[in-house]
Image: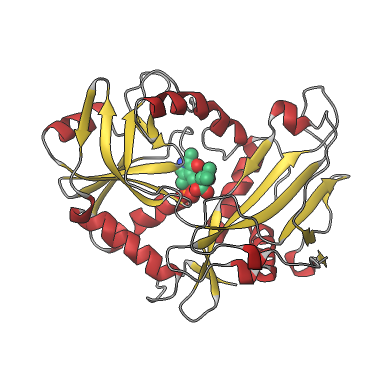
Amino acid sequence: MNTKTINFQVEKTAESKINAVDWDNLPFGKVFSDHMLEMDYADGKWQDPVIRPFQDLKMHPATSVIHYGQSIFEGLKAYRKEDGSVSIFRPEMNGKRFAESCKRMCMPELSPELFVELVAKLVEIDEAWVPKKEGYSLYIRPFLFAMDDYIGIKPSDTYKFMIFTCPVGAYYAQPLNVKIEENYTRAAEGGVGRAKTAGNYAASLYPAMLGQKEGFHQLVWTDAKEHKYIEESGTMNIMFVIDDVLITPSEESDTILRGITKRSVVEVAQQWGMKVEERKVTVEEIITACKEGRVQEAFGAGTAATIAPIKMIGFRDEKFELPAVETREFSNKVHQYLDDLKIGKIADENNWVFNV
Ligand code: PLP
Ligand code: COI
């Protein structure tokens, strides 16, 4: 579809729900803005997008996504800038990742340009829902799922692309205790770990629940073959500062989601002249560094999670407490830098901020 000729059909809500929002107590993902966007794929092509009041969907019980999980999503955020306008952080990266997820899951691709345009249009319509309070943002959830009513296994012929938005506060309220997982696996080589597909999250629920019973907020996934290499953690990529070097698992294996927050942190660190190593990271080296007191910082990086400090790492029967969060120079500085960038407090030298 040529993005310049998008024919939006917009049906505005008769009654906004915005006055009912408690802006000082926003839970993550439970408050939904007034409108949503729908765009169907049928007859081998994308149909015109429609923006309508947020509402339930009606589905045939045999809708193929319910049975076989041909479903992908994205997560990005819009921010209220200091001058009152609205920005979105690197949305074209989400558009590219969405197209890659489409390909892996055998779904029709949207161009990253179209993706960004659809996101921007919905945010523009619900602009009033972008929180004004510092530390809050509008979480944007684009998703695509298979719509055929057919119980045979094949790629669907029809799909629905949708976007809705939620004003949100923090995803994690406190620094995290994580456990290095050696029994269960999030993703295996050749599988769908790199795609942002629903089943990856479903597969993580049971092991995460077991971890929570032991007092861990999140698991750190390791490779499926040997449980020897660190991969990522829950809804975040994982990063360490050890001996003043920023270390993070490389993305060459197809088991790790290619995170936009992590990419931004790596790029900023390099621009600041910090030594960065993106490579295979062994469990052994992290545990040894913990024992020797060389882990200066550990944190998760993700859109919902932002920069989430890791307080303690559990491995087998041991628990390693990491340095106090206030003492962590790099992650605190990069967190502040990214926050400031998104709200227009500092110059956007990398051209990462998309202005709505
Ligand atoms: N890894 C997983 C499994 C995720 O769900 C997320 C969140 O999107 C990330 C990593 C971080 O990616 P991003 O920084 O693009 O949000
Ligand atoms: C995101 O950070 O956008 C995620 O995908 C996490 C989400 C599962 C809440």
Looking at the image, how many numbered discs can be counted on the residues? Answer: 0
Residue 335 % position (x, y): 34, 59
Residue 142 % position (x, y): 65, 51
- Is 352 situated above or below 148? below
Residue at 51% x, 28% y is: 205
Residue at 35% x, 32% y is: 216
Q: Is residue 234 visible?
A: yes
Furthest residue to the left? 292
- Is 221 situated above or below 91? above
Q: Quadrant of residue 334?
A: bottom left
Is 288 situated left or right of 280 in this image? left
Q: Nearer the viewer, residue 56 or 235?
A: 56
Q: Is residue 223 visible?
A: no
Q: Nearer the viewer, residue 142 or 17?
A: 17
Is 213 situated left or right of 71 in this image? left
Furthest residue to the right? 43
Q: Nearer the viewer, residue 53 or 5?
A: 53
Image quarter of the N terminus: bottom right
Q: Quadrant of residue 207?
A: top left
Coloration mode: secondary structure
Residue at 61% x, 41% y is: 101
Residue 48 % position (x, y): 83, 58
Image quarter of the C terminus: bottom right
Residue 296 % position (x, y): 18, 46
Residue at 74% x, 26% y is: 67
